[in-house]
Image (spheres, rainbow, N blue to C red):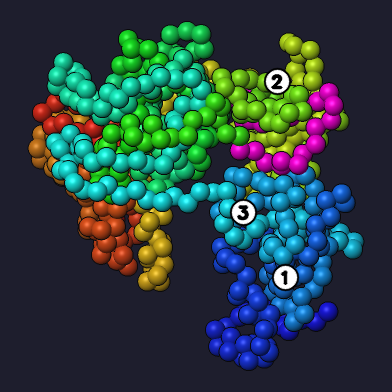
Amino acid sequence: MSFSRKFPVTAIALSMLPIIATACPSGSPLESYSSFPNSAQLPQPGPGQSKFLTQITEVDISRKLIRANTDTQISPDGTELFYGTPAAHTFSIDAITPVYYINNQNRWISIRELKPGTPIAIYGKPNGNSIIAEQVIIPTPDPKTLPQTPVIPAGLNPIEHDKVCMDRVVVPMIFPIAGRNNWSDTFLASRGGGTRRHLGQDLMASKLTPAVATFSGTVFLFTGRGNAGNIITIEGDNGWTAQYYHMNNDSPGTDDGKGTADFCFAPGIRNGERVFPGQLIGWIGDSGNAEGTGPHIHFEIWSQATGAVYNAAPSLSAAKKLSAPVVFAPAPDLAIPKGYGRYEGVIKNIDRDRQVLVLDLIASDTNGKGLQSVTRPTREYLVADAKSKFSIFGLTDPLSFQNILVGDRITTIARLTPPGKGQELTELFALRNLAKPVVQAATQSESQTQPENNGTILLGPNDEFLASLAKVVLDEVNPLRAEKNLAPLTFDPLLARTAQSWTVSMVDGDFFDLTDGRINQSLTELAQRNGAPESTIGVISSAPSIKTIANLLRTDYRDDLLSPSTKSLGIGHTYLDEDTGKVTHQHYWAILIARN
């Protein structure tokens, strides 16, 4: 075994690169390293880990081994080894090792799908004659991830006063409801006694039927939004935005209007998270003005390019129908002993005194026939004991019961028990961001300390929600700033709160302007009073989505966003389903851009 050079990553000077390159012959390790697919997008190794850029030579499924030739190894201290002759390494892998494609961490694959000749990045730790693989990334796109081909409206018809465009579009999608439903084309039907037009399609289904992501994108959650009630918005990767109105607001089996977010949105789903086609996102209901019409989703599609709403009927007619949500779960090779079950979900509550976990289920396998998605909100109770094992996917070090946290996305194996008794927990695997440290949980029982929730949880506009809006813009702008060697813009919660208060003022005061004539004060003056620099820029918009806002800012305020003096921004948003004032908009946006 030989290697051409060994050096710390942090010690490389640009002037050294020509020397290293000339010191290596043609076909050198440096050329191999640079040619490894998407190497720059791979994460750095975690504490105590090494990263191996390899090519598979053999997969021994029975012994759970991967043999591969390594071109490059990055050690825990940052040292990089470029092998002149690829080094043969043996990696041990088990059923709970994360194996996924670089563009789709949501879909773990079986080690049976790994084939000789495939390049892979393995993160692991030495263990005798082999290396324990803690994470495996295939650096090429997932072949089962359908490309998001943009559908651009033809522009044959004008955008009308209520943002409607009559161009016919067919957006590839999964039907938004999994299970039985019925609908007919009611686009532009008269509503409000003839005062407005119906901008969507009403998809009728039983209360608490699953709603699923119609395409991949970023999800945003809203509650208590007037006639629209509880809303799910997906800002699609395909240039389209999907709106789901009237999500459930009732306790199961009632029409009491007191349902919490647990019976409105899917377990664990949060603002700003990624969702994928067919993924469970929520439960159908009759919130808002749907109380008198029966449970349904009012479904709309908006173009992020034009800012207009289009008839969803052609897209819905062509959409793929599902009988149940698609299950996205880790560890497809995890074995389930006879008499045991596998439960996937999010921890709702923990009684540490009795060692009981309350789990909001996503899917389960209790008969050995594979994971099946829940089709109604379902809770399961898991009882731990001294023999129960706890760990985090991708880490070999074990956890304790005290490390398990409310909100953890978990996979569990439990012995099946008679109805009415909690399942006996044998193994639990938490799915966490490996870049964050393991947090020691409080020993006091959360079941005793968590406040009772008697109504719908308001998910916004708090700082987390406002930050999720800003993130969409920052993700568009900061790569452009990086090209100019500028520091990234940041989210400023004070600016965001000021912007949010301005959107509320516009709604309450029935105006749409950068100046509030009632008090003769501008948005930027308010921001300065709250501590913003004098040169802060204020923007308002009635755009239908945050993606449209991002496009507007990137186009119309490009010079400001790419200025070295611009440091941060904040965005506020208020939504009205039916604006009865003189100024009529559904969306009221305010943006503040701080410049020093």
Asked whether the viewer can see residue 494, the reply is: no
**Which amino acid is tagged 2?**
Tyr
The residue mark sitting in front, 2 or 3, is 3
Name which of mark 2 and mark 1 comes first in the sequence. Answer: 1
Q: Mark 3 highlights which residue?
A: 101
Q: x, y percentage for residue 456? A: 44, 20
Q: CA distance from mark 3 to mark 1?
A: 20 Å
> Residue at the spot x=67%, y=21% of the render?
380
- Point out the stretch of residues depicted in magenta: 328-354
Vertical placement of 183 versus 278: above or below?
A: above
> Residue at the spot x=36%, y=59% of the render?
477
Q: x, y percentage for residue 198? A: 24, 25
Callout 3–callout 1 Cβ contact below 8 Å: no
Q: CA distance from mark 2 to mark 3?
A: 33 Å
Name which of mark 3 and mark 1 comes first in the sequence. Answer: 1
**Which amino acid is tagged 3?**
Tyr
Between 590 and 551, which is closer to the camera in this rendering? Answer: 551
> Residue at the spot x=76%, y=42% of the render?
333
Name which of mark 2 and mark 3 comes first in the sequence. Answer: 3
Between 403 and 213, which is closer to the camera in this rendering? Answer: 213
Q: Mark 2 highlights which residue?
A: 381
Q: Secondary structure at mark 2?
A: strand
Q: x, y percentage for residue 585? A: 19, 33
Figure quadrant of the C terminus: bottom left
Q: Mark 1 highlights which residue?
A: 73
Callout 2–callout 3 Cβ contact below 8 Å: no
Q: Is residue 340 magenta?
A: yes
Q: Is residue 202 magenta?
A: no
Q: CA distance from mark 2 to mark 1?
A: 44 Å
